[in-house]
Image: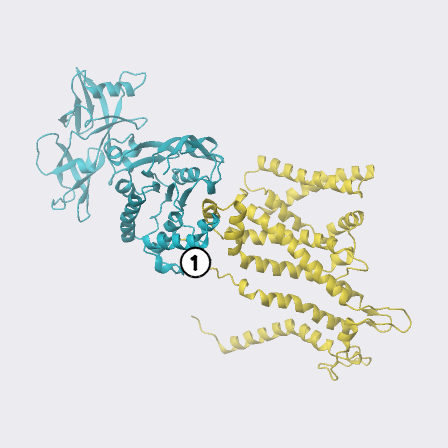
Chain colours: A cyan, B yellow
Amino acid sequence: MANLRLENVTKRFGPITAVKALNLEIRDGEFFSILGPPGAGKTTTLRLIVGLEKPDEGTVYIDGEPANEIHPGKRDIAMVFQNLALYPDKTVFDNMAYPLRERKLPKDEIERLVQATAKSLYIDHLLKRKPAKLSGGERQRVAIGRAMVRKPKAYLLDEPLANLDALLRLEMRVELKRLQGELGQTLVYVTHDQVEAMSMADRIAVLNKGVLQQCDTPEAVYNFPANRFVATTIGSPPTNFVTADVRPHGDNLLLAHSVFALAVEGGRHPARAALESAAAGQALPEKVLIGFRPEDVRVSTSQANGCNVPAQVSVVEPLGGETVVDLRMGGDLVKAVVPPTQRLEERRHVWLNFDPERVHLFDARTGQRVYTTGQGEPFACLEAVH
Amino acid sequence: MYQTRPWQKVLRYFTIIIVSIMFFFPTYWMITMSFKPKGEWNSAAGTIYWVPQNPTLDNYKTVLTEYRGQFFRANQSSALPSIRSSIVVSIGGTLFALLIGTLAAYGISRHSTDTGDLPWYIAVGRLGLLVLVMLPFIVLWARLGILATWYGILTFTIIGIVADQIIGRVLGKYYKGAVGSLSFSILQLRMFPPMAILIPVMIMWSTFRLIDTWYGLVIVYGVVTFPFVVWLMKSFFDDIPKELDEAAVVDGSSNWRAFFKVVLPLAKGGLASTALFVFILNWSDFLVALLLTSRNWGTIPVFLNKLVSSEIGAQHGPKAALGLLAVIPPVVFGLLIQQYLVRGLTFGAIKK
């Protein structure tokens, strides 16, 4: 069991800063996921934890002990590489026995441990084969087995499912979650696939360009994204953003888009305070980004109660279980997820009806989230102000 | 597929036959000549014997035994010492080059940031700059009278290495792109024609008392073939994903053990072919051995050159016999490692 902590860790490769002043704490026994696009510094973060890279600044702590100077082999952390890195000239047995042999365990003990681990991963019939003769899923299991066999404090997995086919990926996802539950060990899981992160992790750290964007539970990351980047990365299709002007309107504030407006009613509305504090120096920002998820939008052919925004259907993508609709709303393109039973033709004029409880406001310049209606008071909705 | 006309076929086979004759006739001639008696390889009448008329092993006896001439004392010794010498210095030089070259290649493959191809004008320019910078030192060292002393040579060498690195840095500042670094300096060693460095090496070796010793030759062979080892082995190591050694390190190996237990076994095919290549280079060297040996450690090529008698001139028969014997070791070596020469390492470890 291990508690892993990165304190102010920076890593540069020449002119590129791969990881920038990263603070991260991975708790004991946690299924922790690091999510980000390619080049976000995810793999570098793993390599820093296991010790294959030395931080230029900051400290990596393992169980509270500074570990910067500890050799990777002495950290008692196992890592599964993205390309698996199985030793091609060694059999599955020798691959899995390698870490035990390096620890000078007695022969019968090695035999016993490898057999037991192989059994728990359903690869005990493959022990005499070489990696080249295995399928993708089997290799995956061997790599995990090589990590498991020495019972490390923590596991680091670098995109372990990235190169498997879709069906196998689903299977291994469940398998991994089961394994982690049984082992009860700290597991750090790097992925660029938000579905994997959301479905498996206890907590998710979202990285972009080496900078930590948000680190929280999957629900919190989904419901309260820290900024525009997180809101776009988490959830599929990504969150819709439209720009609105901020206009004082008597006691109220109007967040005016070309085809609709949200009204922040009253001088004591928490959104007003949030907007004011976001616009450092000025009283109020001129523009604000309104974000809402495609899942939170209903599309109807007639006006309903609440906020009705006129829009035109642009593209319809039926996915079977749901249908994604691209809509033209004023000058913006937004997406909505509708039930598959709803029939919508392209170019049809419809009404968008979004959940007033689930609207986010983002700073137009920095992209930081400033306010979410779910947290405080909702907005009133005005239609078609020009 | 396109059609091959009959005359094209004829032309193709004709070419193949001509080229084959060009390549194989000398071999045939050497083999047959080694079995010809003196009268046939040195026929007075100018008759050409295409096939030995009276096959004999005399030539082999001549080169393998001591021969006392009628008028001079022991004017010809046996080739056995030179065969021993060739074996010792070739194997020694090969092992020496492999030892330092393989380690250097691994280091460069894993840690060098100097990638990218070097344009020829940068390579030549850099070398030219180095020569220019070093010229005044030669003059100065000569004036000081230390050009041929061990400390003179040592300081000159160190200044040369430092100057080369400084030139690299300075070039790197003004030229965006590859200017070469350590790995380039190693390759640069190959740009000198051997003749250009041999005379200084001769002076150095006589200063260090390394002339006509087996270790003196081993050092030269090792150093001269070292760049080949580095560049060949680097390409083999580059083919082995660095995640493999990293996995070994994470699994608890030291960096050295990761290299010896994981990386080197995967590169053994490359190591074998590099060893063969370097061995053949050393085995067939004439120039270095000629200049750096005298009585005791002359190699087979040097001995071949000496196979001249005062009675009949060049002794073609014994030369052919010794030449044929000299072919055996590389061929045997090649056959022994044949299975490793195939680069069919299945890299099943890595999912692509």
Q: Nearer the viewer, residue A367 or A64?
A: A64
What amino acid is found at the position of numbered circle 1 in the picture? Thr
Residue drawn at 29 percent across, 40 percent down:
A201
A167 to the left or right of B181: left
Does A259 sit above or below residue A121?
Answer: above
Does A111 sit above or below residue A68?
Answer: below
Residue lying furthest right: B71
Q: Nearer the viewer, residue A361 or B6?
A: A361
Instruction: Classify residue B319 by image quadrant.
Output: bottom right
A26 to the left or right of B212: left
Looking at the rendered structure, the secondary structure element under dot 1 is loop
Provide the residue designation for mark 1: A91
- The answer to whether residue B121 is seen in the rendering is no
Image coordinates for residue B71, horizontal then vertical, percent: 91, 72
Residue drawn at 49 percent across, 39 percent down:
A71
Which chain does the numbered disc 1 sit on? A
Residue drawn at 39 percent across, 52 percent down:
A113
Q: Nearer the viewer, residue A235 or A31?
A: A31
Image coordinates for residue B138, horizontal then vertical, percent: 77, 40
Instruction: Classify residue A126 by image quadrant.
Output: bottom left
Image coordinates for residue A130, horizontal then vertical, percent: 42, 59
Instruction: Classify residue B30 by image quadrant.
Output: bottom right
